[in-house]
Image (cartoon, grey):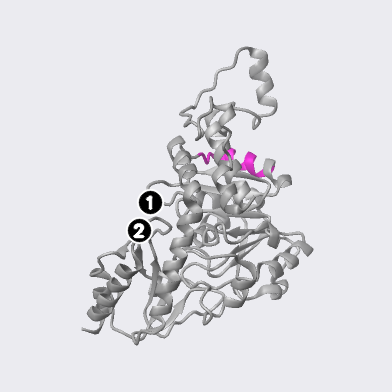
Amino acid sequence: MNKETRILHAGRHPERHSGAVNPPVYHASTILHPSVAAMEASGKTPFDGVRYGRFGTPTTFAFEEAMAEIEGGGRAIATSSGLAAITGALMTFLKAGDHLLMVDTVYFPTRKFCDTVLAGFGVETTYYDPLAGGAIADLMRPNTRVVFTESPGSLTFEVQDIPAIARVAHEAGALVLLDNTWGVLTFQPFAHGVDVSIQACTKYVVGHADAMLGALTVRDDLWHQAKTAITTIGHSPGAEELYLGLRGLRTLAVRLKRHAETAMELCRWLETRPEVARVLYPPLPSDPGHALWRRDFTGACGLFGVILKPAPKAAVDSLLDGFAHFKLGFSWGGFESLAIPTGGHSIVRTATDWRPEGPSLRFHAGLEAVEDLRKDLEQGFERLRR
């Protein structure tokens, strides 16, 4: 089936639920057993069936089945947030004495986790240039166990050569993890050599800015190891959040298409503006990552960056403060349009040097009419000039 069709049916089994179109929402912690023998038997295979709420309910299993299908992987594990999926995956596959290669453009909370928690556990992290590709071989060590990728990169949108990185990592016996939140539906991680794909489902999967949810999809042979570690750590999403994730999945394809169309129209217009030095959006032919994006992705989303020509902070603040539609907020992927400044302390690099020619901003194109969003930006530029 076409992906747009599969996403409507993934994880749905009406025959198991009296014909209900959507999986029921199970609010459950305690699960009762009919006998001591049944209780003892359930402990021998703790992840088969419903044994305890933290291990999963039919609502959990429906969401995980759907996520694994759209990611093109083996099995998925739901978590309470995207960061929980990232940290759970890293703690699953790393131990004291291991070495981690972490992309330098990574989501800042992931960097903080590496530099504080993982370092305290005896895991050494080396940050690498996102554009290294196969040259990452120079950084591999005998104890390198994980290469973490994020493509495009947080805030600055560098596209990584995931197949080249995967070849090098696998030759050295390391796993490749990917934060695939930007590429949801449009990048098939397992077809490009990824072993673990992570989604901040809070973003596009939920799609309505009203729930925290994450997921990691793994190869079949890695699932039991990951499931054991993540349930032992205590990561567990709530029933309502799982329901909102399932609801969001059904409209994800059509929403994502609209987000991407609006973002592209705005980015092309922004490239013509005298106030703009550069637009950071891989689908644009002018973007440095366009060739890799075109090779590996089948589409895009609504998140992009803008580098302004030099301007004082007060002028940039005035641009942002006065928006009617691009509200100031740190998330993205919902129906609403958002904007944040991304310069200064918010961009941390230790392996590379990223110095834009002017103030940098990040935008998320929501589902508003593109004409209204363009007018909002135009009025913002007027405030910037004044």
Q: Would residue 232 be counted in the magenta stretch? A: yes
What number is the disc on residue 146? none
Q: Residue at x 56, y 57 (%)?
A: 185
Mark 1: give few (<14), some (14-19) or many (20+) Cα within 10 Å: some
Q: What stretch is highlighted in magenta?
A: 225-236
Percent position of residue 5, x then y: 58, 49
Q: Which residue, as the protein is rendered here, is positioned at the far left?
A: 386
Q: In which quarter of the image is the C terminus?
A: bottom left
Say which amino acid is labelled 1: Ala
Q: In this view, does 335 lie to the left or right of 320?
A: right
Residue 109 in the image, given as x and y percentages of width and height:
47, 59
Q: Residue 4 placed where, x, y %?
A: 56, 52
Disc 1 marks which residue?
209
For numbered disc 1, what is the local secondary structure? loop
Q: Residue at x 46, y 35 (%)?
A: 239
Residue 173: quadrant of the picture = bottom right
Name which quarter of the figure residue 192 lies in.
bottom right
Q: Residue furthest right?
A: 171
| Secondary-structure class at tag 2 | loop
**Residue located at (61% from left, 77% from top):** 291
Front: mark 1 or 2: 2
Q: Relative to 237, does residue 30 appear above or below in the rendering?
A: above
Three-letter residue code for mark 2? Glu
Can the viewer see residue 68 in this picture?
yes
**Residue 15 vs residue 123, the one in the foreground:** 15
- Residues at marks 1 and 2 touching, judged by CB atoms closer than 8 Å: yes
Residue 336 got which mark?
2
Main SS type for the magenta part?
Answer: helix
